[in-house]
Image: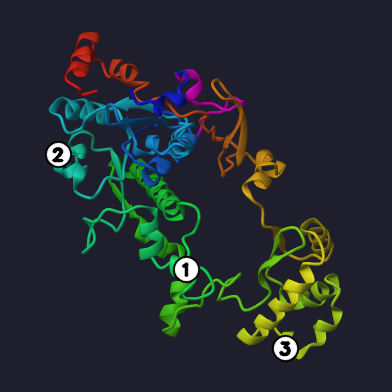
Amino acid sequence: MNTIKESTGIDTAQNQASENESGLKGALDKLRVIDLGLLVQGPQAALLLADLGADVIKIELPDFGDQARWLPISMEDLRAPWFIGCNRGKRSVTLDLRLRQGKEIFLRLVETADVVVSNFLPGTMEGWGLGYDQLAERNSRIIYGAASAFGSLGPDASRKGADLTGQAAGGMLYRTGTGPEDITPIGVTLADHIGSQNLANGILAALFSREKTGRGQKVEVSLLGGQIYAQASEYTYYFLTGKAPGHANRGHPMLPTIYGIFPTSDGHLAIVGVAAHLRPAFFQAIGRPELTDDPRFIGPLLTDENRRILFDLLTEILQSKTTIEWEQILEAAGQRYAPVRDYAQVAHYEGAFINGYLQRINHPEWGPTTMIGFPIQLSETPATPGRIAPELSQHTEEILLELGYGWDEINSFRDAKVI
């Protein structure tokens, strides 16, 4: 038995969340989603649908499961953040889609479903006889969401990839740091996350279309496509000028104003754009009113050289006080700012809980725990984030019984290693 999976076990009633505390149903209540996803891009798209009230059934390979289960905190702590974070509130079924009986069970499940989510390599599902065309023959209303690394067409369609693939191939990485020799990965799975949101949006659009046409459709997204789309302004700059914007260099290369990250005496502070008409108040607030009349810093846009000079000055000035002190000063001056928080500081920021972005739960195994909430508020159909991720195969028998299989058949499937 997979020891990593054992760390996430809970009962079905605690795992699923169909109503919030007010008793209101989620926007996607009664929608059934089959999640074939691995790691982040596919599972997180299905997670968004689950948080909005859908019944998400996660299909996993028998005796192994989602690869994310095998990325634990450490060999001493086998809880798997990648899996837990993207699969809470789902039901886990093990099923080998490569076997004839596994395909038959899957197709029966498809007949009861609204959406299928997958981020297998393009052509994999088709090779198993389970591509969109085959699924649509069994259920013409099915929406098939397919996520990949490079898209299903073109010279790289058959190449494998992961989050860093999108960051690198889509141009995002090249914008980080201070120059070509200072390129660093973004320290979160940003390409995966953007890809998952694109996939969820595409699925929601397809569901809306189905209400008018009665037919489902295939939805395709990729890590590469998501990264290019996320840089719409920067790429447009390139297409209009023939040259790429510069590197981030503590700010944004297309915003030649006071827009950047600066050290304080105990941390860092983001100054989030100081419009020309607010600049006198800003210079007054930081104790340097004479800078208002400095010709180098007059006007809405600064030259690269003058911006560098001003950033050096601000770096020295802002290190004279703590982050909280500067927050109070800039708030009073009507400026835009934000503290650069680490994870511990975000985890203690009450605004994240009040808005539902984080949630405090009492986990049946771990005790009081903080989990990710949901970033969207809906007044009439509020989201209800699932609390806990399922054990591998936790709901296999439950789902097969729902599909009409008897215990003799279920036992035969287990003997044949179909489930």
The residues tagged by marks 2 and 3 sit, at their Cα atoms, a distance apart of 66 Å
Residue carrying label 2: 129
Kind of element beneath mark 2: loop
The quadrant in which residue 312 appears is bottom right
Disc with the residue nearer the chain's start (1 vs 2): 2
Q: In the figure, 39 relative to 185: above or below? A: above
Quadrant in which the N terminus is drawn: top left
Give left or right: position of 196 versus 345: left
Q: Position of residue 48 (x, y in %)?
A: 46, 40
Q: Which amino acid type is marked by label 2?
A: Gly
Q: Which amino acid type is marked by label 3?
A: Arg
Residue carrying label 1: 183
The residues tagged by marks 1 and 2 sit, at their Cα atoms, a distance apart of 42 Å
Q: In front here: 140 or 40?
A: 40
- Residue range (magenta): 12-28
Q: In the figure, 211 relative to 310: above or below? A: above
